[in-house]
Amino acid sequence: MKKRIFSGAQPTGELHIGNYLGALKNWVALQHEYESFFCIVNLHAITLPQNPEVLKKKTLDLARIYLASGIDPQVSTVFIQADVAEHAELAWVLSCVSRMGELERMTQFKDKGKGNTERAGVGLFTYPVLMAADILLYQTDLVPVGKDQKQHLELSRDLAERFNRDYGDAFVIPEPFIPPVGASIQSLQDPQKKMSKSDENLNGSIFLLDDADTVTKKIKRAVTDSGTDIKFDESRPAINNLLTIYHLVTDKSVAECEANFDGKGYGQFKTELAEAVVEFLRPFQARVADYADAELEKILKDGAEKARAIARETLRDVYEKMGIVRLS
Ligand code: AQP
């Protein structure tokens, strides 16, 4: 039997090349090897305020992005989180198993809550518990994510182990799959920060739907480090980040990338990088319009039905083990 993977993204903001290189690219590569579940995590989206109309639209847009990236709905299960109510139910159960202290240690809560815990939403605080529910419901073996989600995944493992120890084995303990390269694509404007949908500086991120002109301008404006060599070098985070993007969008080896820019200046490097990113995005952008609304909805409904059957079984077992009675 194939092992199982689960992953998801939030239908908030515009997906950027970091989301693609850190997550989606790996989902596409892994889907034939694993039984795959890819979720549009719209319940996670409301942990920060959203405009309801925009959120509705973004939910279907994100499904289009998944499919345009190469996720094959004949092979993988693609669905919307809110279509499977068991996600919210298991999140409640797991919140009763979680400790305040462990959630307080989550760095994303500190970042997104901007250090003001009095004003931060409770949903933002318990976000990692909902993420644990997403993963554990499907008896997931492997979770392909970017580096920013590593801590949340460790919490999922801790909660699964605690539940299994206290009530009996109900969950597979998931492993993270964090790509060796591309797990953290940094902002073009501040290479100390990860590229992020919610960054107010739009020049920091290359969005998957940016046109050629916008991509080129953003790359030309990208900050660089001192020095002139165009080589992979962690101590020069700006150039390292740009070269990593080049490496991943062209699929050229590290040596080929360095050889290609040997003796060239930053100007030439940025021109070639912009061309490579535009070329990489072109076929993807053409595919985004491939699916009509009705076809897309059918894929998502079929996906939800398949997901629900597994989720229901896991929750039934969890309730049984905890002594939660349901008469119907
Ligand atoms: N900069 C990044 N580099 C590599 N991978 C990344 N991911 C996010 N940013 C980078 C990975 O993308 C997947 C989906 O992310 P998400 O929708 O759950 O959003 P997020 O992790 O909260 O990060 P975003 O997209 O930048 O949004 P904001 O601005 O809201 O934080 C995940 O697997 C994530 O690791």
Image (cartoon, rainbow, N blue to C red):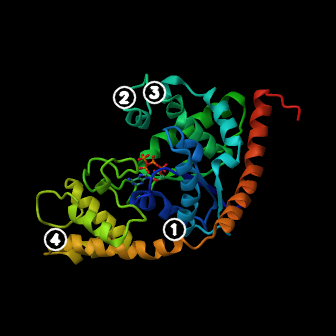
Residue denoted by label 1: 69
Disc nearer the start of the sequence (2/4): 2
Residue type at mark 3 is Glu
Q: Are marks 2 and 1 in contact (CB under 8 Å)?
A: no
Q: Residue at x 33, y 65 (%)?
A: 245
Residue denoted by label 4: 267
Residue type at mark 1 is Ser
Mark 1, secondary structure of its residue: helix
Mark 3, secondary structure of its residue: helix
Residue 264 in view of the camera: yes
Q: Are marks 3 and 1 in contact (CB under 8 Å)?
A: no
Disc nearer the start of the sequence (1/4): 1
| Alpha-carbon span between mark 3 and mark 2 | 11 Å
Residue 164 at what x, y percent from top left?
Answer: 67, 34
Residue denoted by label 2: 115
Mark 2, secondary structure of its residue: loop
Q: Are marks 1 and 4 in contact (CB under 8 Å)?
A: no
Disc nearer the start of the sequence (2/1): 1
Q: Is residue 186 left or right of residue 197?
A: left
- The picture quadrant where one finds residue 214 is bottom left
Q: Is residue 302 left or right of residue 176?
A: right
| Alpha-carbon span between mark 3 and mark 1 | 35 Å
Residue type at mark 2 is Gly
Residue type at mark 4 is Gly
Residue 121 at what x, y percent from top left?
Answer: 49, 30
- The picture quadrant where one finds residue 322 is top right
Compared to residue 242, the image places residue 268 above or below, namely below
Q: Nearer the viewer, mark 3 or mark 2?
A: 2
Mark 4, secondary structure of its residue: helix
Residue denoted by label 3: 104
Q: Residues within 10 Å of mark 2 (few under 14, many from 20)?
A: few
